[in-house]
Image (cartoon, coloured by chain):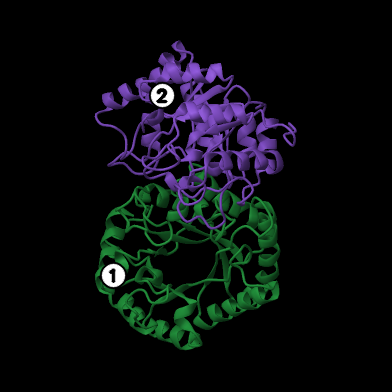
Chain colours: A green, B purple
Amino acid sequence: MRDFSNDHSALTLNTATLGHNVKGRGAGWSPEQVIDLCAELGLGGVVFWRREIGSRAAQVGAHARQANLKVAGLCRTPFLVGPLAPRPRQAMLDDFEAAIDMAAGLGAEVLTIVVGGVEPGSKGLSISLDHVADSVARMAPIAAARAVRLALEPLHPVYGGDRSCLVSLKDANDLCDRIDHPAVGIAVDVYHVWWDTSLAAQLVRAGKDRLFGYHLCDWLAETRDVLLDRGMMGDGVADLKAIRQAVEAAGYQGLCEVEIFSAETWWKRPPREVLQTCIERFRSVC
Amino acid sequence: MRDFSNDHSALTLNTATLGHNVKGRGAGWSPEQVIDLCAELGLGGVVFWRREIGSRAAQVGAHARQANLKVAGLCRTPFLVGPLAPRPRQAMLDDFEAAIDMAAGLGAEVLTIVVGGVEPGSKGLSISLDHVADSVARMAPIAAARAVRLALEPLHPVYGGDRSCLVSLKDANDLCDRIDHPAVGIAVDVYHVWWDTSLAAQLVRAGKDRLFGYHLCDWLAETRDVLLDRGMMGDGVADLKAIRQAVEAAGYQGLCEVEIFSAETWWKRPPREVLQTCIERFRSVC
């Protein structure tokens, strides 16, 4: 297991930690300001959300490279299925391709897929997962041609209805088996998987080639809002050291992306204070 | 699979469906009123919460038997671990025993265990699950001596932090294997397990002898409150027919207990209307 106690060069900022993924929230910094602060503080990478980038992908990507900071990823595709997916399906696929374009323009290695919930009119997860498999298989060659990898992110089962019919690492592995394309893998986020006693075994099953990302935050024992009340690493009940040990035992040696949706706590603090806290916690409790 | 289209004799009311588990909520009917309505409408059983019974267990139990209605269960033990468990541990064990006494007094077959969340100061689930195993193993002979069975209820992983470190049927099976006592089994609630693609396999693993109860409601696609916004059967995304098929394929032929925590919808409607809706949905979509 890597020793991070005096090294945070693997730490990556997902700008959701500054509230930038939700309109009207957070510090409102430009992508360039965020890049400059991450570079100054010695982080290894940054992950943006599409709403921050607009039509400036190439420009922002160039600024990051100039600052010697990796754009490690982009959030995210549209929901592919479920009540929140764009309709008709072609509109969803067009938006999926636009997301691939933006990732390629930024020079981002990975585009995250949040798959969406249960298809209206259906029951259970299986029909929706079939649709997800179809759509991702269709987009995988397009992504690969632009050197973008697609990371399926299983979300916590609390989102199963509306945001993600993909709710466990096991199901993500099953989906990868079905799609069977080297550009399609998995992002593992402690918030979504900390409770899963099958995690270590499913991480080994995923293996190095399929693990495209590892995301950090914490699950607060008393979570007031499942969407916007994530905890800073160390403030919750997830066993972060044990999870990282399992992730690395499965072969992952990549960046560790901190992604804290926290409307009432961390989004109200200055970005520099938030990042400094992330660094301190990354070195001590992750 | 049993045909319920013209038969709701297996339908059982958990009084949480009338709001009686939360102070100041619901219709405020006495247990006797609830028993009389359930009997009149042809239900097979009723499950009470301790706060409704107080010191009147024998009296309420006698009323139910007179009405030819089974008291199928009692909710519930105290939390055994986690931030909401009684302290010190002996106080928790005393309250656990009081719950067994009440179940025996009522003539209730099953006492439900909601195990509680992550032990303060610990991380992850394993330490807390160890404590749960110890406490349940200690209480199992006491329950058995009073002809009460203990049903471990895995809750949805959203409650992992504060209310239940037991979050899947797999973990409940593992816990039963460890405790290895015939008076200890599992209650399966669709709200908590609908998202689990390992469910059918874990139901088979549990088998008839370990399945002590089957609970019905629905998971609303857009759930506003994970505690008090459960859906009426048919209004959500759980595949209720498929789940019951799997439950029965595993050998369960017992009562089906409707348990809907719904502060803003069903708790505001008259008990007779709620029960009539439960009957109609039980016959058509469960």
Circle number at residue A268: 1
For the N terminus of chain B, the image quarter is top right
Label 2 SS: helix
Q: Which mark is residue A74?
A: none
Does residue A246 lie above or below B128 as drawn?
A: below
Q: Amino acid at mark 1?
A: Lys
The picture places residue B218, in percent across and down from the top left corner, at: 58, 46
Residue in the image at 31% along x and 34% along y: B85
Side of A160 where A2 appears, left or right: left
The residue at 53%/78% (across/down) is: A103
Residue bearing mark 2: B136
Q: Amino acid at mark 2?
A: Val
Q: Chain of mark 2?
A: B
Residue A148 lies, in percent from the top left, at 57, 74
Q: Chain of mark 1?
A: A
Picture residue at 49% right of the left edge, 50% below the top: B229
Q: Position of residue A205 (x, y in %)?
A: 57, 49
Disc 2: CA contacts within 10 A as few (<14), some (14-19) or many (>=20)? many
Q: How many marks?
A: 2
Q: Quadrant for the C terminus of chain B, please.
A: top right
Q: Secondary structure at mark 1?
A: helix
Q: Is residue B215 left or right of residue A221?
A: right
Query: Is circle 1 on the same chain as circle 2?
Result: no
